[in-house]
């Protein structure tokens, strides 16, 4: 690529971001009815264009296979019938969600009679950088626009054809319903230099959300001059307390690991209280091993479960996204919490316990974005938590933490209502 071509690319990205900024000002003023009309029209257009979109997706999958892309990534790339149905249902779910824009909260009246509140407003222009999963293109656009924002979407190169086909329908639906077309922008290139340019456009872009592997997250965090909310890896843990019920432990651990492996809320490390190592752990590991899961354990784990293999140090911080589970026996809850603090990713941590005091101690002391008692890690999901939909699961503690829905895509301004008050 020549220097002139680099300059042209940079200018094209700057122009797209500037148009998105202009569109975001209009988006913040649109009625809920207009935004919902766009969502409904998008669902109609996607269904009508299904064959063309599936052809584009098949092309992406074939090219990924030719390039030797791992099967776990190719599985995330496909738009199966189930994923397609979920994507369309998600649009209607977002229609049903209350519009947060304009909502006033935290009302108070000052001693001088001045009324004070905080009004939810859009963030502005959100740049979303993500890998695989073409359905994220539709989900992210739906949530960002319902919250009054404009969105710039940069999916992975492996899903380029799918994302462009989806983006054409998103923008066409905007034209059909009077929504600013530039409120939905898909970067028209797979050149990674486009990301480098975009990450410096703090005059046009208000927030960057990277969603993908550790390499992508590190790059964006290091290079961006724009605020970043990271949706990082999910090194999720379950802790088997000494008082854990065996049957409950077997079922929760099984679903947390087996329900859907290539997802960020899947179980990757199982921690076990030393007092449960012989009473609870063997049944849990036998169930997983019979289901085809490789057990990589500490010395104590290998002692109590002969089919386990020795874990390496790197396994404790690994997001496997595969039928592999790291297992460690710890002395007590302190040991479990120390392990999570050392190796976790601030995603999801569950305790299985029959002790109410222990459950409350766990909830108080573990500060990952989702912390639970006696339930599957799979509940760390915006839909499951009542958000209707999510743009991802934030592992950044500032602004939004955990599953990030419509509320997380807004900020708040102070509003003052007076009757002639002077500060004096």
Image (spheres, rainbow, N blue to C red):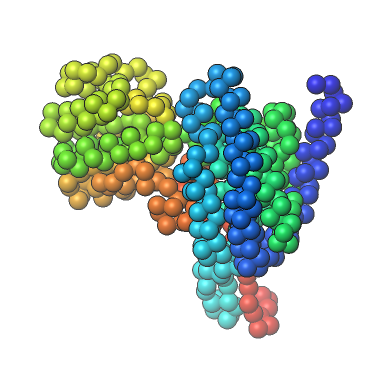
Residue 127 in picture, x, y percent from top left: 65, 43
Q: Along the line of sight, which residue is nearer the eye, 329 or 152?
A: 152
* Residue 55 visible in the displayed image: yes
With 200 as the anchor, is 326 left or right in this view?
left
Q: Is residue 144 above or below residue 208?
A: below
Q: Along the line of sight, which residue is nearer the eye, 152 or 46?
A: 46
Q: Residue furthest bottom?
A: 419
In the picture, residue 312 is in which quadrant?
A: top left
Q: Quadrant of the N terminus?
A: top right
Image point 32% across, 47% down: which residue? Answer: 372
With 11 as the anchor, is 160 left or right in this view?
left
With 354 as the anchor, is 259 left or right in this view?
right
Q: Residue furthest left?
A: 279
Q: Is residue 51 above or below residue 110?
A: above
Residue 143 in picture, x, y percent from top left: 57, 53
In the picture, residue 347 is in which quadrant?
A: top left
With 424 as the anchor, is 410 left or right in this view?
left
* Residue 126 visible in the displayed image: no
Image point 30% across, 39% down: which residue? Answer: 255
Residue 34 in picture, x, y percent from top left: 66, 65
Q: Along the line of sight, which residue is nearer the eye, 230 or 134?
A: 134
Image point 27% across, 37% down: which residue? Answer: 253
Image point 51% across, 28% down: which residue? Answer: 73
Q: Along the line of sight, which residue is nearer the eye, 60 or 96?
A: 60
In the picture, residue 341 is in which quadrant?
A: top left
Q: Quadrant of the C terminus?
A: bottom right
Residue 21 in picture, x, y percent from top left: 75, 51
């Amino acid at each position: 690529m020549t220097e002139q071509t680099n300059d042209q690319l940079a200018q094209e990205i700057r122009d797209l971001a500037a148009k998105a900024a202009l569109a975001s000002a209009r988006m913040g003023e649109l009625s809920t009815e207009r935004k919902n009309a766009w969502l409904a029209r998008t669902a109609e257009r996607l269904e009508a264009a299904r064959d063309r979109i599936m052809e584009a997706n098949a092309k992406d999958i074939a090219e990924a296979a030719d390039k030797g892309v791992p099967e776990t990534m190719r599985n995330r790339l496909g738009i199966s019938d189930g994923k397609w149905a979920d994507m369309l249902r998600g649009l209607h779910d977002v229609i049903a969600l209350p519009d947060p824009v304009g909502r006033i909260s935290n009302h108070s009246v000052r001693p001088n009679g001045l009324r004070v509140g905080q009004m939810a407003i859009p963030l502005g222009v959100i740049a979303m950088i993500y890998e695989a999963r073409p359905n994220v293109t539709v989900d992210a656009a739906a949530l960002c626009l319902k919250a009054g924002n404009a969105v710039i979407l940069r999916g992975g190169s492996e899903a380029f054809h799918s994302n462009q086909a989806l983006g054409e329908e998103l923008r066409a639906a905007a034209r059909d319903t009077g929504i600013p077309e530039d409120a939905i922008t898909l970067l028209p290139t797979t050149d990674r230099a486009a990301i480098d340019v975009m990450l410096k456009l703090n005059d046009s872009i208000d927030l960057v959300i990277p969603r993908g592997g550790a390499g992508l997250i590190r790059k964006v965090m290091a290079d961006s001059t724009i605020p970043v909310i990271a949706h990082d890896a999910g090194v999720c843990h379950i802790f088997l307390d000494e008082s854990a019920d065996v049957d409950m432990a077997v079922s929760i651990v099984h679903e947390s690991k087996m329900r859907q492996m290539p997802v960020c809320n899947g179980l990757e490390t199982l921690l076990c209280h030393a007092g449960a190592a012989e009473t609870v752990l063997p049944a849990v590991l036998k169930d997983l091993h019979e289901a085809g899961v490789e057990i990589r354990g500490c010395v104590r784990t290998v002692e109590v479960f002969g089919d386990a293999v020795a874990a390496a140090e790197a396994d404790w911080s690994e997001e496997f996204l595969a039928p592999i589970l790291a297992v460690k026996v710890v002395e007590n809850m302190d040991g479990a919490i120390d392990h999570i603090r050392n190796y976790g990713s601030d995603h999801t941590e569950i305790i299985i316990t029959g002790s109410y005091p222990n459950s409350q101690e766990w909830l108080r002391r573990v500060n990952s974005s989702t912390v639970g008692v006696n339930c599957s890690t799979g509940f760390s999901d915006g839909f499951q938590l009542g958000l209707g939909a999510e743009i991802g699961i934030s592992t950044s503690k500032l602004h939004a933490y955990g599953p990030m829905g419509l509320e997380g895509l807004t900020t708040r301004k102070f509003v003052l209502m007076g009757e002639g008050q002077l500060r004096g």
